Image (cartoon, helix red, strand yellow):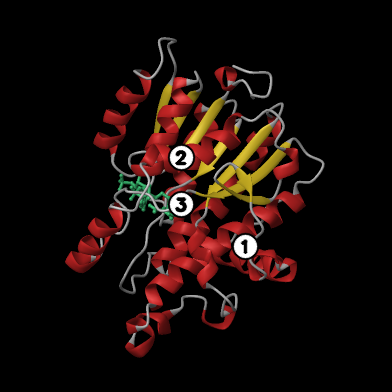
C-alpha cells in the first residue's frame, strides 16, 4: 500500500449490486485489499456464492456479511438497514451501485416508477438510514455509481409527473423514453451526491460519484430479445467489469478524497458535470421531492 492510499484493511465496506457486473468486480478488488464487506443483495443463494468468492480474494481472513433486500422496495430497504445497524458497529464506506433500466412502465409496491425507485430512491433512503453509523466512523465515504448516460438529460425532471409515465407510451417511448428515464436517474445520482456533500460539509463523511464507462455486464438483460441483441453488439466495444470498477476502487482507496467531495469522476479523473448536473437549485428541489417520496429526512 502506498502513502497515498486509505488503508482498506481496517475498514467495513457496504455495497449494493455486488452479485454481478461492476459491483462484483469492485467488491472483489476491495476484498483483496483486506476490507470486511457487507453485501446487500436480493438473492440469498447468489449472495452466498459471492461471499465465498470474496473470501478467496485475500489470504487474510475477512468477514463478509449478507443482507437481503429488494432495493426497489422501501420497506425491504428499511428492514435491511435495521439488520445492518444491529450487526455492523462500524461502516466506513457505503457504495450505492445497484441499478437497472426498465423498458416498460413498472410500479413498485410504493407506487413509484421502478427505475427511479431502484436507481435513485434506494441510494437516497439507504444512505439516510445509515448516515448516523457512517458519522461514527473516523472518516467515511459514500460512493454512488452514476453514468455518462446522464448527459442525455437537458431539462432536468418533470416534478409534476415524477413517475414519468409519458416516457413509456406512444412516440416518446419510440424515441427512447425509457432510456431517457434511466438517464434521469443517473443525473439524480450526481445531484444527490453534490447535495449530500453540501449538507455534510465539515463532517467526517465525503460523497462521490463516478461513471464506469460502457461495461459488459448483465445490464439491460431484463428487457427482451432486442435489448439483449443490442447489448451483445455493444459488448464488442465495452470494458470489462474490472475496468468499469476501476474508478470506484480508486475513490475507495485514495487517502485524501476531500478535493473530490460532491464531485463526479470518470477514468480516475474529476469530470466537469453538464450544466443541468451542476444546477444547485435543481439538486435542492430533487432532495425535497425525494424526502417526500421516501417519507424520511436526511439530517
Ligand atoms: P448488472 O446488471 O451486471 O448488475 C446490477 C446489480 O444490481 C446486480 O448485482 C443486481 O442483482 C443488482 N440489483 C438489480 N436490481 C436489484 C434490486 N431490485 N434489489 C437489489 N439488487 C438489485 O449491471 P452493472 O454492473 O452494469 O450495473 C451496476 C451499476 O452501473 C448500475 O447503477 C448502472 O446504472 C451503472 N452503469 C452501468 C454501465 C454499463 O455499461 N454496464 C454504464 C454506466 C453505469 P442480481 O445479481 O440479483 O441481478
Residue at mark 2 to residue at mark 3: CA–CA distance: 9 Å
Q: Nearer the viewer, mark 1 or mark 3?
A: 3
Residue highlighted by disc 1:
291
User: Which residue is pictured at 60% across the width and 58% down the height?
Assistant: 190
Marks 1/2 in contact by CB < 8 Å: the verdict is no
Can you give x and y, in whole percent of width and height, for residue 12 in the image? Answer: 55, 26
Residue at mark 1 to residue at mark 3: CA–CA distance: 30 Å
Q: Secondary structure at mark 2?
A: helix
Crowd band around label 3 with a 10 angstrom C-alpha radius: few (<14), some (14–19), many (20+): many
Q: Secondary structure at mark 1?
A: helix
Residue 213 tag number: 3
Which residue is nearer to you in this view: 52 or 122?
52
If the image is split into quadrants, where does the N terminus sit? top right
Mark 1 CB near ligand 1 (8 Å cut): no
**Residue 297, placed above or below residue 38:** below
Q: Is residue 41 visible?
A: no
Residue highlighted by disc 2:
245
Residue 26 lies left or right of residue 285; in this view the side is: left
Amino acid at each position: 500500500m502506498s502513502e497515498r492510499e486509505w488503508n482498506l484493511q481496517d475498514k467495513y465496506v457496504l455495497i449494493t449490486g455486488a452479485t454481478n457486473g461492476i459491483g462484483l468486480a469492485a467488491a472483489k478488488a476491495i476484498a483483496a485489499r483486506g476490507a470486511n464487506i457487507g453485501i446487500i443483495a436480493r438473492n440469498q443463494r447468489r449472495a452466498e456464492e459471492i461471499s465465498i468468492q470474496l473470501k478467496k480474494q485475500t489470504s487474510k481472513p475477512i468477514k463478509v456479511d449478507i443482507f437481503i433486500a429488494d432495493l426497489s422496495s422501501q420497506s425491504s430497504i428499511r428492514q435491511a438497514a435495521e439488520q445492518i445497524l444491529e450487526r455492523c458497529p462500524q461502516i466506513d464506506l457505503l457504495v450505492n451501485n445497484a441499478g437497472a433500466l426498465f423498458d416498460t412502465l413498472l410500479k413498485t409496491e410504493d407506487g413509484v416508477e421502478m427505475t427511479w425507485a431502484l436507481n435513485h430512491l434506494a441510494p437516497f433512503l439507504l444512505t439516510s438510514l445509515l448516515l448516523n453509523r457512517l458519522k461514527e466512523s473516523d472518516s467515511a465515504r459514500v460512493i454512488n455509481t452514476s453514468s455518462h448516460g446522464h448527459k442525455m438529460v437537458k431539462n432536468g425532471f418533470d416534478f409534476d409527473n415524477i413517475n414519468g409515465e409519458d416516457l413509456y407510451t406512444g412516440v416518446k417511448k419510440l424515441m427512447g423514453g425509457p432510456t431517457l428515464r434511466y438517464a434521469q436517474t443517473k443525473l439524480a445520482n450526481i445531484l444527490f451526491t453534490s447535495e449530500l456533500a453540501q449538507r455534510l460539509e465539515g463532517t467526517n463523511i465525503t460523497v462521490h460519484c463516478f461513471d464506469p464507462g460502457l461495461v459488459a455486464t448483465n445490464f439491460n438483460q431484463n428487457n427482451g430479445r432486442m435489448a439483449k441483441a443490442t447489448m451483445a453488439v455493444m459488448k464488442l466495444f465495452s470494458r470489462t467489469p474490472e475496468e468499469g470498477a476501476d474508478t470506484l476502487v480508486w475513490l475507495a482507496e485514495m487517502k485524501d478524497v476531500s478535493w473530490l467531495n460532491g464531485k463526479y469522476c470518470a477514468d480516475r479523473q474529476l469530470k466537469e458535470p453538464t450544466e443541468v448536473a451542476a444546477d444547485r437549485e435543481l439538486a435542492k428541489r430533487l432532495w425535497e421531492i425525494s424526502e417526500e417520496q421516501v417519507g424520511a429526512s436526511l439530517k
